[in-house]
Image: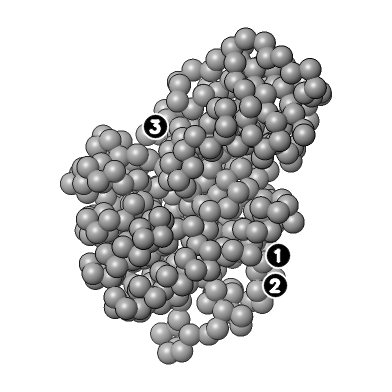
Amino acid sequence: MAAYLFHGGKFLDPRKADLQDGIEVLIEDDRVKEVSDRPISAASANRVDLRGRTLMPGLIDAHIHIFLAEVNLALLEGMPLTLLTTKAVVNARNMLMRGFTSLRDTGGCDAGTKVAAETGIMDSPRLFISGMPISQTGGHADFRRRNQTTIECACCSGLSYMSRIADGVPEMIKAVRDELRKGADQIKIMVSGGVASQSDPLESIQFRLDEIEAAVEEATHWRSYVLAHAYSAEAIRRAVSSGVRTIEHGNLIDAAGAKLMAERGAYIVPTLVAYDCLQRRGPGYGLSAYSLEKNKIVLDAGLRSLELSRAAGVKIGFGSDLLGQMQDDQCREFLIRSEAMKPHEIIHSATIVNAEIVQRPGQLGEIVPGAYADLLVVDGDPYKDLGLFQDQGAHLSAIVKGGRFYKNQLQH
């Protein structure tokens, strides 16, 4: 039984706005055993001297796509799944090395990848998977070209592996049941247009109310939930009124929509870094003029969506939604949000709130007895300097997931 006793540093409790001194933490195997403001007696544990560094819970990204390995989605057409999977393995490990010990993959990741992460075959954060996102014909995840009628099989096209199409209540019921059967932790549906898609307007409303309600009912029967890609205020209201639990992006939300979300206990997961990055780097990767035009609209509205949600009391999660080569900008989300939120609020989103979103409160996102031993040792005070999350994990002396060190530059 591996045991470690962390002492001699600062302690970051995401529920508090200031760091604490004199806290010791004992982990045994994959769990936190004890947290105390007094010396912990554990003679057999390996002692880890933090030497003034900060001990904090591992981060959670609630909106990523490890299989979306190209900014230009057209390059995924015809890409063998073996190559796509290899790229996904690298993406997952890179996110772990940035301090993200848990990820909610919002489309593309399957049960096989999750098993590989759980069994240690690949170095990866914990994965909460959505399977194939569900789109209506002509919706945000209908990737067919305008002159294409049939859908290529997933084994022949990486892009086809990223979504499925359902029209009408019976098809929606079947699609949700099938994704849950295949191991999805939650269900993703597309209820508005999007930036990367080439055939649907950003403001388009997708799926009828009875289709959305059918998805929610089936997921609820499974003790799961539905998350919805949604930009416009109307799309958000329709989804939340139909029982959708988390709204992804939500850039064009209005005050009425935010009020409804707060009343229904729905979460919003902004992904502001995606639009910042697409604007700066998208043209170099072949992003179309049509996508850049749509991106400008949601980019300009991003911080306003945070302010409206915060004012209404909506719980705000943390996501990045970066494509392919842009995933190295994942931690810029901290810096962008700092224009509208305080550092401790942002870290609270990436820990406590996201643990609630993935339905693991008390087990992830905080260092408390019984929680998974997912820990970061940071070279400084993140509440004073969010730049400590930049530079691909360079300012993290240690990364621990489930009691195992994946990075350790500390002296025991």
Secondary structure under tag 3 reads loop
Disc number for residue 82: 2
Residue nearest the observer in this picture, 29 or 72: 29
User: Which quadrant does the N terminus fall into?
Assistant: top right
Q: Horizontal placement of 177 versus 209: left or right?
A: right
Q: Mark on residue 86?
A: 1
Helix, strand or loop status at disc 1: helix
Front tag of 2 and 3? 2
Please provide percent x and percent y for residue 188: 41, 62
Q: Is residue 219 above or below residue 173?
A: above
Q: Quadrant of residue 408?
A: top right
**Which quarter of the figure has residue 200?**
bottom left
Identify which residue is drawn at 46% across, 35% down.
352
Residue 196: percent from left, percent from top: 44, 66
Q: Which dot, 3 or 1, sits closer to the camera?
A: 1
Question: Relative to residue 82, is residue 71 drawn left or right?
Answer: left
Q: Are circles 2 and 3 on residues that touch, CB within 8 Å?
A: no
Q: Amino acid at mark 3?
A: Met
Q: How far separated are the C-alphas under marks 1 and 2?
A: 6 Å
Q: Which of the two residues, 291 or 385, is positioned nearer the viewer here?
A: 385
Q: Residue at x 70, y 70 (%)?
A: 83
Q: Secondary structure at mark 2?
A: helix
> What's the distance in space between the residues labelled 2 and 3, CA to CA?
41 Å
Q: Farthest residue to the left: give it.
A: 256
What residue do we see at 71% from left, 54% from top? 119
Q: Which mark is residue 341?
A: 3
Whether pointer 1 and pointer 2 mark residues with C-beta atoms closer than 8 Å, the reply is yes
Q: Is residue 322 visible?
A: no
Answer few, some or many: residues within 10 Å of disc 3's Cα (few below 14, many 20 plus, some between 14 and 19): some
N-term-proximal mark, 3 vs 1: 1
